[in-house]
Amino acid sequence: MRRYAELWRLPSAPLLIVAGIVGRLPGGIAPLALLLFVADRTGSYGVGGIAVGIYGLATAAVAPLLGRVADRRGFTAVLVGTGVGYPVAIGVLVTTALAGAPVVLIFLAAAFAGSLVPLLSSSLRAIWTDLADSADLADSADRADSADRVGSANVESTRQTAFALDAIALEVVWMTGPVLVAVAVATTSATWGPVIALGGAATAALVGSLAVAVSRPSRRWRPRPVEAGTVRRNPLRARGMAPALVAAFALLFGTGAIEAAMAAFADAEGKPALSGVLLSVWSVGSAIGGLWFGAQRFAMPVVRQYRWTLAACALGFAPLAFLGNAWLIGIVLFLGGTAFAPAITVQNSLVAELAPRGTLTESFTWLTTVTYAAVAAGTAIGGVLVDRPGGVTAALLLAAAAAVLAWSIAAWPGTSLQTKKLSEASS
Protein backbone atom coordinates (compact mmCIF):
# COMPACT_ATOMS: atom_id res chain seq x y z
CA MET A 1 0.00 0.00 0.00
CA ARG A 2 3.05 2.28 0.07
CA ARG A 3 2.49 3.28 -3.54
CA TYR A 4 -1.07 4.40 -2.77
CA ALA A 5 0.13 6.38 0.25
CA GLU A 6 2.64 8.21 -1.95
CA LEU A 7 -0.07 8.98 -4.48
CA TRP A 8 -2.39 10.25 -1.75
CA ARG A 9 0.19 12.90 -0.85
CA LEU A 10 0.15 14.46 -4.33
CA PRO A 11 -1.49 17.94 -4.53
CA SER A 12 -5.29 17.77 -4.14
CA ALA A 13 -5.23 13.97 -4.57
CA PRO A 14 -7.85 13.26 -1.85
CA LEU A 15 -10.25 15.80 -3.37
CA LEU A 16 -9.75 14.40 -6.87
CA ILE A 17 -10.35 10.84 -5.68
CA VAL A 18 -13.53 11.59 -3.72
CA ALA A 19 -14.95 14.06 -6.23
CA GLY A 20 -14.09 11.66 -9.04
CA ILE A 21 -16.13 8.91 -7.41
CA VAL A 22 -19.10 11.17 -6.63
CA GLY A 23 -19.11 12.89 -10.01
CA ARG A 24 -18.98 9.62 -11.93
CA LEU A 25 -21.78 7.91 -10.03
CA PRO A 26 -24.07 8.50 -13.03
CA GLY A 27 -21.93 5.95 -14.87
CA GLY A 28 -23.01 3.27 -12.41
CA ILE A 29 -26.55 4.51 -11.87
CA ALA A 30 -27.89 5.93 -15.12
CA PRO A 31 -27.61 2.94 -17.53
CA LEU A 32 -29.41 0.49 -15.23
CA ALA A 33 -31.89 3.08 -13.92
CA LEU A 34 -32.67 4.28 -17.44
CA LEU A 35 -33.08 0.70 -18.68
CA LEU A 36 -35.52 -0.16 -15.87
CA PHE A 37 -37.35 3.18 -16.10
CA VAL A 38 -37.97 3.09 -19.85
CA ALA A 39 -38.78 -0.63 -19.76
CA ASP A 40 -41.39 0.07 -17.07
CA ARG A 41 -42.92 2.96 -19.02
CA THR A 42 -42.98 1.14 -22.37
CA GLY A 43 -43.26 -2.52 -21.33
CA SER A 44 -40.19 -3.54 -23.34
CA TYR A 45 -36.60 -4.20 -22.34
CA GLY A 46 -35.75 -3.81 -26.00
CA VAL A 47 -36.95 -0.20 -26.00
CA GLY A 48 -35.19 0.38 -22.69
CA GLY A 49 -31.96 -1.03 -24.08
CA ILE A 50 -32.22 1.19 -27.15
CA ALA A 51 -32.76 4.24 -24.93
CA VAL A 52 -29.61 3.35 -22.98
CA GLY A 53 -27.80 2.83 -26.27
CA ILE A 54 -28.83 6.25 -27.58
CA TYR A 55 -27.81 7.85 -24.28
CA GLY A 56 -24.36 6.28 -24.52
CA LEU A 57 -23.90 6.99 -28.21
CA ALA A 58 -24.74 10.66 -27.64
CA THR A 59 -22.02 10.78 -25.00
CA ALA A 60 -19.68 9.08 -27.43
CA ALA A 61 -20.42 11.59 -30.18
CA VAL A 62 -19.96 14.75 -28.11
CA ALA A 63 -17.14 13.77 -25.72
CA PRO A 64 -14.24 14.00 -28.23
CA LEU A 65 -15.27 17.55 -29.10
CA LEU A 66 -15.31 18.47 -25.42
CA GLY A 67 -11.95 16.75 -24.97
CA ARG A 68 -10.41 18.81 -27.75
CA VAL A 69 -11.74 22.00 -26.14
CA ALA A 70 -10.29 20.90 -22.78
CA ASP A 71 -6.88 20.19 -24.35
CA ARG A 72 -6.78 23.72 -25.73
CA ARG A 73 -8.64 25.75 -23.09
CA GLY A 74 -8.52 23.75 -19.88
CA PHE A 75 -10.96 21.61 -17.92
CA THR A 76 -12.76 24.12 -15.74
CA ALA A 77 -15.23 25.62 -18.21
CA VAL A 78 -16.05 22.23 -19.74
CA LEU A 79 -16.70 20.63 -16.34
CA VAL A 80 -18.83 23.51 -15.09
CA GLY A 81 -20.93 23.60 -18.27
CA THR A 82 -21.64 19.88 -18.39
CA GLY A 83 -21.96 19.58 -14.62
CA VAL A 84 -24.78 22.13 -14.60
CA GLY A 85 -26.37 21.00 -17.86
CA TYR A 86 -26.61 17.30 -17.04
CA PRO A 87 -29.18 17.60 -14.21
CA VAL A 88 -31.35 19.76 -16.45
CA ALA A 89 -31.20 17.15 -19.21
CA ILE A 90 -32.05 14.31 -16.80
CA GLY A 91 -35.07 16.32 -15.64
CA VAL A 92 -36.22 16.67 -19.25
CA LEU A 93 -35.79 12.93 -19.83
CA VAL A 94 -37.74 11.89 -16.73
CA THR A 95 -40.54 14.38 -17.42
CA THR A 96 -40.84 13.21 -21.02
CA ALA A 97 -41.18 9.55 -20.08
CA LEU A 98 -43.57 10.15 -17.17
CA ALA A 99 -45.80 12.24 -19.43
CA GLY A 100 -46.33 9.22 -21.68
CA ALA A 101 -44.63 10.86 -24.65
CA PRO A 102 -44.01 8.83 -27.82
CA VAL A 103 -40.95 6.60 -27.80
CA VAL A 104 -39.15 8.81 -30.31
CA LEU A 105 -39.31 11.75 -27.87
CA ILE A 106 -37.95 9.57 -25.08
CA PHE A 107 -35.07 8.64 -27.37
CA LEU A 108 -34.40 12.31 -28.16
CA ALA A 109 -34.43 13.17 -24.45
CA ALA A 110 -32.02 10.30 -23.79
CA ALA A 111 -29.69 11.69 -26.46
CA PHE A 112 -29.89 15.15 -24.88
CA ALA A 113 -28.96 13.75 -21.46
CA GLY A 114 -26.15 11.63 -22.88
CA SER A 115 -24.61 14.58 -24.69
CA LEU A 116 -24.17 16.44 -21.39
CA VAL A 117 -22.50 13.71 -19.32
CA PRO A 118 -19.64 15.54 -17.55
CA LEU A 119 -16.15 14.98 -18.98
CA LEU A 120 -14.78 13.71 -15.67
CA SER A 121 -12.96 10.50 -16.55
CA SER A 122 -10.85 12.02 -19.33
CA SER A 123 -10.12 15.15 -17.30
CA LEU A 124 -9.08 13.19 -14.22
CA ARG A 125 -6.80 10.86 -16.20
CA ALA A 126 -5.08 13.82 -17.82
CA ILE A 127 -4.71 15.50 -14.41
CA TRP A 128 -3.32 12.29 -12.88
CA THR A 129 -0.82 12.03 -15.73
CA ASP A 130 0.38 15.59 -15.10
CA LEU A 131 0.58 15.01 -11.35
CA ALA A 132 2.62 11.83 -11.88
CA ASP A 133 5.01 13.68 -14.20
CA SER A 134 5.33 16.58 -11.75
CA ALA A 135 5.98 14.25 -8.83
CA ASP A 136 8.73 12.52 -10.78
CA LEU A 137 10.35 15.84 -11.71
CA ALA A 138 10.35 16.91 -8.06
CA ASP A 139 11.80 13.60 -7.00
CA SER A 140 14.43 13.71 -9.74
CA ALA A 141 15.68 17.07 -8.47
CA ASP A 142 16.88 15.27 -5.35
CA ARG A 143 18.56 12.55 -7.41
CA ALA A 144 20.82 14.34 -9.84
CA ASP A 145 22.77 11.18 -10.50
CA SER A 146 19.74 9.09 -11.46
CA ALA A 147 19.53 7.81 -15.01
CA ASP A 148 16.83 8.95 -17.42
CA ARG A 149 15.70 5.37 -17.77
CA VAL A 150 15.01 5.13 -14.05
CA GLY A 151 13.09 8.40 -14.10
CA SER A 152 10.98 7.15 -16.99
CA ALA A 153 10.26 3.93 -15.11
CA ASN A 154 9.22 5.95 -12.07
CA VAL A 155 6.81 8.01 -14.17
CA GLU A 156 5.26 4.90 -15.69
CA SER A 157 5.01 3.20 -12.30
CA THR A 158 3.38 6.26 -10.72
CA ARG A 159 1.00 6.52 -13.65
CA GLN A 160 0.08 2.86 -13.30
CA THR A 161 -0.73 3.33 -9.62
CA ALA A 162 -2.75 6.46 -10.42
CA PHE A 163 -4.64 4.69 -13.20
CA ALA A 164 -5.22 1.69 -10.94
CA LEU A 165 -6.66 4.00 -8.31
CA ASP A 166 -8.82 5.59 -11.00
CA ALA A 167 -10.01 2.14 -12.09
CA ILE A 168 -10.79 1.26 -8.47
CA ALA A 169 -12.74 4.51 -8.16
CA LEU A 170 -14.74 3.47 -11.20
CA GLU A 171 -15.36 0.07 -9.65
CA VAL A 172 -16.68 1.82 -6.55
CA VAL A 173 -19.02 3.61 -8.94
CA TRP A 174 -20.07 0.37 -10.66
CA MET A 175 -20.39 -1.28 -7.25
CA THR A 176 -22.48 1.35 -5.50
CA GLY A 177 -24.44 2.58 -8.51
CA PRO A 178 -26.42 -0.62 -9.17
CA VAL A 179 -26.94 -1.13 -5.43
CA LEU A 180 -28.41 2.37 -5.13
CA VAL A 181 -30.73 1.60 -8.03
CA ALA A 182 -31.69 -1.72 -6.44
CA VAL A 183 -32.40 -0.05 -3.08
CA ALA A 184 -34.45 2.68 -4.75
CA VAL A 185 -36.53 0.11 -6.64
CA ALA A 186 -36.93 -2.20 -3.64
CA THR A 187 -38.06 0.58 -1.29
CA THR A 188 -40.41 2.37 -3.69
CA SER A 189 -41.68 0.96 -6.97
CA ALA A 190 -40.59 -0.09 -10.45
CA THR A 191 -41.49 3.40 -11.70
CA TRP A 192 -40.37 5.75 -8.95
CA GLY A 193 -37.27 3.83 -7.89
CA PRO A 194 -35.44 4.51 -11.18
CA VAL A 195 -36.66 8.13 -11.11
CA ILE A 196 -35.15 8.64 -7.66
CA ALA A 197 -31.94 6.96 -8.81
CA LEU A 198 -31.69 9.21 -11.87
CA GLY A 199 -32.23 12.26 -9.67
CA GLY A 200 -29.43 11.12 -7.39
CA ALA A 201 -27.16 10.60 -10.40
CA ALA A 202 -27.85 14.14 -11.62
CA THR A 203 -27.05 15.61 -8.21
CA ALA A 204 -23.83 13.61 -7.91
CA ALA A 205 -22.70 14.74 -11.36
CA LEU A 206 -23.24 18.37 -10.42
CA VAL A 207 -21.35 18.14 -7.11
CA GLY A 208 -18.45 16.07 -8.40
CA SER A 209 -17.92 18.09 -11.58
CA LEU A 210 -17.86 21.41 -9.77
CA ALA A 211 -15.48 20.06 -7.12
CA VAL A 212 -12.96 18.89 -9.73
CA ALA A 213 -13.43 22.08 -11.77
CA VAL A 214 -12.41 24.33 -8.87
CA SER A 215 -9.56 22.10 -7.67
CA ARG A 216 -6.03 23.50 -7.85
CA PRO A 217 -4.74 20.98 -10.45
CA SER A 218 -7.66 21.75 -12.75
CA ARG A 219 -7.31 25.52 -12.43
CA ARG A 220 -3.53 25.41 -12.87
CA TRP A 221 -3.51 22.94 -15.73
CA ARG A 222 -2.14 24.39 -18.97
CA PRO A 223 -2.27 22.91 -22.47
CA ARG A 224 0.88 21.11 -23.55
CA PRO A 225 2.43 22.47 -26.75
CA VAL A 226 2.58 20.18 -29.75
CA GLU A 227 5.91 18.68 -30.73
CA ALA A 228 8.27 21.15 -32.42
CA GLY A 229 7.84 21.38 -36.18
CA THR A 230 4.54 19.49 -36.23
CA VAL A 231 0.88 20.34 -36.41
CA ARG A 232 -1.59 19.13 -33.81
CA ARG A 233 -2.20 15.48 -34.68
CA ASN A 234 -5.41 13.52 -34.62
CA PRO A 235 -4.81 10.98 -31.84
CA LEU A 236 -6.79 8.36 -33.77
CA ARG A 237 -4.00 8.35 -36.37
CA ALA A 238 -1.28 7.66 -33.83
CA ARG A 239 0.43 4.31 -34.28
CA GLY A 240 -1.37 1.63 -32.28
CA MET A 241 -4.21 3.87 -31.05
CA ALA A 242 -6.92 2.45 -33.33
CA PRO A 243 -6.38 -1.23 -32.41
CA ALA A 244 -6.12 -0.29 -28.73
CA LEU A 245 -9.50 1.46 -28.90
CA VAL A 246 -11.09 -1.37 -30.90
CA ALA A 247 -9.91 -3.89 -28.31
CA ALA A 248 -11.33 -1.65 -25.57
CA PHE A 249 -14.64 -1.43 -27.45
CA ALA A 250 -14.90 -5.21 -27.70
CA LEU A 251 -14.22 -5.74 -23.99
CA LEU A 252 -16.66 -3.06 -22.85
CA PHE A 253 -19.32 -4.16 -25.33
CA GLY A 254 -19.30 -7.43 -23.42
CA THR A 255 -19.90 -5.65 -20.12
CA GLY A 256 -22.97 -3.92 -21.59
CA ALA A 257 -24.37 -7.26 -22.75
CA ILE A 258 -23.79 -8.72 -19.28
CA GLU A 259 -25.63 -5.79 -17.69
CA ALA A 260 -28.69 -6.36 -19.88
CA ALA A 261 -28.53 -10.11 -19.23
CA MET A 262 -28.38 -9.63 -15.45
CA ALA A 263 -31.40 -7.29 -15.53
CA ALA A 264 -33.44 -9.84 -17.48
CA PHE A 265 -32.21 -12.75 -15.34
CA ALA A 266 -33.24 -10.95 -12.15
CA ASP A 267 -36.63 -10.10 -13.65
CA ALA A 268 -37.19 -13.74 -14.62
CA GLU A 269 -36.34 -14.76 -11.06
CA GLY A 270 -38.99 -12.34 -9.79
CA LYS A 271 -36.37 -10.24 -7.99
CA PRO A 272 -35.67 -7.07 -10.02
CA ALA A 273 -33.27 -5.76 -7.36
CA LEU A 274 -31.07 -8.85 -7.82
CA SER A 275 -29.50 -7.38 -10.96
CA GLY A 276 -27.96 -4.56 -8.97
CA VAL A 277 -26.60 -6.98 -6.40
CA LEU A 278 -24.98 -9.24 -9.01
CA LEU A 279 -23.38 -6.33 -10.86
CA SER A 280 -22.06 -4.99 -7.57
CA VAL A 281 -20.51 -8.36 -6.71
CA TRP A 282 -18.71 -8.18 -10.04
CA SER A 283 -17.43 -4.72 -9.14
CA VAL A 284 -16.22 -5.88 -5.72
CA GLY A 285 -14.07 -8.52 -7.40
CA SER A 286 -12.79 -5.97 -9.87
CA ALA A 287 -11.92 -3.46 -7.14
CA ILE A 288 -9.95 -6.09 -5.22
CA GLY A 289 -8.06 -7.09 -8.35
CA GLY A 290 -7.35 -3.45 -9.19
CA LEU A 291 -6.15 -2.69 -5.66
CA TRP A 292 -3.62 -5.52 -5.83
CA PHE A 293 -2.54 -4.68 -9.37
CA GLY A 294 -1.90 -1.01 -8.66
CA ALA A 295 0.39 -1.83 -5.76
CA GLN A 296 2.71 -3.88 -7.98
CA ARG A 297 5.59 -2.84 -10.22
CA PHE A 298 5.77 -5.09 -13.28
CA ALA A 299 8.79 -5.55 -15.54
CA MET A 300 6.47 -6.88 -18.24
CA PRO A 301 5.80 -4.37 -21.07
CA VAL A 302 2.42 -2.66 -21.01
CA VAL A 303 1.26 -4.28 -24.26
CA ARG A 304 1.94 -7.74 -22.86
CA GLN A 305 0.14 -6.86 -19.63
CA TYR A 306 -2.84 -5.83 -21.75
CA ARG A 307 -2.90 -9.18 -23.54
CA TRP A 308 -2.77 -11.15 -20.30
CA THR A 309 -5.45 -9.12 -18.54
CA LEU A 310 -7.76 -9.35 -21.58
CA ALA A 311 -7.25 -13.11 -21.67
CA ALA A 312 -8.20 -13.30 -17.99
CA CYS A 313 -11.35 -11.24 -18.67
CA ALA A 314 -12.35 -13.62 -21.47
CA LEU A 315 -11.91 -16.59 -19.14
CA GLY A 316 -14.08 -14.83 -16.56
CA PHE A 317 -16.90 -14.10 -19.03
CA ALA A 318 -16.98 -17.57 -20.62
CA PRO A 319 -18.75 -19.66 -17.92
CA LEU A 320 -21.62 -17.22 -17.28
CA ALA A 321 -23.81 -18.44 -20.15
CA PHE A 322 -23.86 -21.95 -18.71
CA LEU A 323 -25.02 -21.03 -15.20
CA GLY A 324 -28.62 -20.69 -14.11
CA ASN A 325 -28.19 -20.20 -10.38
CA ALA A 326 -27.82 -16.72 -8.90
CA TRP A 327 -25.25 -17.87 -6.33
CA LEU A 328 -23.05 -19.50 -8.97
CA ILE A 329 -23.36 -16.47 -11.24
CA GLY A 330 -22.35 -14.23 -8.35
CA ILE A 331 -19.27 -16.35 -7.57
CA VAL A 332 -18.13 -16.39 -11.20
CA LEU A 333 -18.76 -12.66 -11.57
CA PHE A 334 -16.65 -12.02 -8.48
CA LEU A 335 -13.76 -14.21 -9.62
CA GLY A 336 -13.85 -12.99 -13.21
CA GLY A 337 -14.13 -9.41 -12.04
CA THR A 338 -10.67 -9.55 -10.44
CA ALA A 339 -9.17 -9.20 -13.94
CA PHE A 340 -11.37 -6.33 -15.10
CA ALA A 341 -9.89 -3.34 -13.21
CA PRO A 342 -6.32 -4.45 -14.07
CA ALA A 343 -7.33 -4.57 -17.75
CA ILE A 344 -8.77 -1.04 -17.51
CA THR A 345 -5.64 0.16 -15.68
CA VAL A 346 -3.33 -1.14 -18.41
CA GLN A 347 -5.68 0.20 -21.06
CA ASN A 348 -5.31 3.71 -19.62
CA SER A 349 -1.52 3.38 -19.43
CA LEU A 350 -1.42 2.25 -23.04
CA VAL A 351 -3.47 5.21 -24.26
CA ALA A 352 -1.24 7.61 -22.30
CA GLU A 353 1.81 6.16 -24.08
CA LEU A 354 0.19 6.25 -27.52
CA ALA A 355 -1.22 9.80 -27.29
CA PRO A 356 0.62 12.42 -29.39
CA ARG A 357 1.85 15.40 -27.38
CA GLY A 358 -0.83 18.03 -26.85
CA THR A 359 -3.70 15.55 -27.30
CA LEU A 360 -3.71 13.71 -23.97
CA THR A 361 -7.20 14.75 -22.86
CA GLU A 362 -8.66 14.17 -26.32
CA SER A 363 -7.02 10.73 -26.41
CA PHE A 364 -8.50 9.81 -23.05
CA THR A 365 -11.81 11.24 -24.25
CA TRP A 366 -11.75 8.88 -27.22
CA LEU A 367 -11.24 6.04 -24.74
CA THR A 368 -14.18 7.34 -22.70
CA THR A 369 -16.19 7.65 -25.90
CA VAL A 370 -15.39 4.07 -26.79
CA THR A 371 -16.40 3.03 -23.28
CA TYR A 372 -19.81 4.69 -23.44
CA ALA A 373 -20.45 3.60 -27.02
CA ALA A 374 -19.42 0.01 -26.33
CA VAL A 375 -21.42 -0.37 -23.12
CA ALA A 376 -24.40 1.30 -24.80
CA ALA A 377 -24.19 -0.94 -27.86
CA GLY A 378 -23.77 -4.03 -25.71
CA THR A 379 -26.72 -3.06 -23.53
CA ALA A 380 -28.88 -2.26 -26.56
CA ILE A 381 -28.14 -5.51 -28.40
CA GLY A 382 -28.28 -7.47 -25.17
CA GLY A 383 -31.64 -5.84 -24.38
CA VAL A 384 -33.03 -6.94 -27.73
CA LEU A 385 -31.71 -10.48 -27.23
CA VAL A 386 -33.12 -10.95 -23.73
CA ASP A 387 -36.64 -10.16 -24.96
CA ARG A 388 -36.52 -13.49 -26.84
CA PRO A 389 -36.55 -17.09 -25.56
CA GLY A 390 -33.07 -18.09 -24.46
CA GLY A 391 -32.02 -14.47 -24.73
CA VAL A 392 -30.11 -14.32 -21.43
CA THR A 393 -27.86 -17.17 -22.53
CA ALA A 394 -27.41 -15.57 -25.95
CA ALA A 395 -26.45 -12.22 -24.42
CA LEU A 396 -23.88 -13.86 -22.14
CA LEU A 397 -22.39 -15.86 -25.02
CA LEU A 398 -22.12 -12.60 -26.95
CA ALA A 399 -20.26 -11.03 -24.02
CA ALA A 400 -17.77 -13.92 -23.91
CA ALA A 401 -17.21 -13.72 -27.67
CA ALA A 402 -16.58 -9.97 -27.41
CA ALA A 403 -13.93 -10.50 -24.72
CA VAL A 404 -12.20 -13.13 -26.86
CA LEU A 405 -12.23 -10.67 -29.76
CA ALA A 406 -10.61 -8.01 -27.54
CA TRP A 407 -7.81 -10.40 -26.62
CA SER A 408 -7.36 -11.44 -30.26
CA ILE A 409 -6.92 -7.83 -31.37
CA ALA A 410 -4.33 -7.14 -28.69
CA ALA A 411 -2.48 -10.41 -29.34
CA TRP A 412 -2.43 -10.27 -33.14
CA PRO A 413 1.00 -9.03 -34.33
CA GLY A 414 -0.43 -7.29 -37.38
CA THR A 415 -2.38 -4.76 -35.31
CA SER A 416 0.79 -2.68 -34.68
CA LEU A 417 -0.33 -2.21 -31.08
CA GLN A 418 3.10 -0.91 -30.16
CA THR A 419 4.92 2.33 -29.36
CA LYS A 420 8.58 3.28 -29.49
CA LYS A 421 8.83 3.33 -25.71
CA LEU A 422 7.05 -0.02 -25.37
CA SER A 423 9.23 -1.55 -28.07
CA GLU A 424 12.34 -0.46 -26.19
CA ALA A 425 10.92 -1.96 -22.99
CA SER A 426 10.42 -5.28 -24.78
CA SER A 427 14.01 -5.43 -26.03
Image (tube, rainbow, N blue to C red):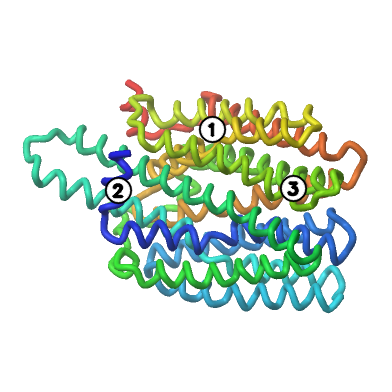
- The tag earlier along the polypeptide, 1 or 3, is 3
The residue tagged 1 is 339
Circles 1 and 3 in contact, beta carbons < 8 Å: no
Q: Nearer the viewer, mark 2 or mark 3?
A: 3
Q: Is residue 167 left or right of residue 1?
A: right
Residue 239 seen: no
Q: Residue at x 38, y 48 (%)?
A: 356
* Residue 362 located left or right of residue 117: left
Mark 3 residue element: helix
First in sequence: mark 2 vs mark 3: 2
The quarter of the picture where residue 18 lies is: bottom left
Q: Where is residue 164 shown, x and y percent of the image?
A: 42, 42
Measure the alpha-carbon separation of dots 1 and 3.
23 Å
- Residue behind mark 3: 274
Q: Amino acid at mark 3?
A: Leu
Disc 2 target residue: 7
Graded by Cα atoms within 10 Å as few (under 14), some (14 to 19) or many (20 or more), the crowding at tag 1 reads: many
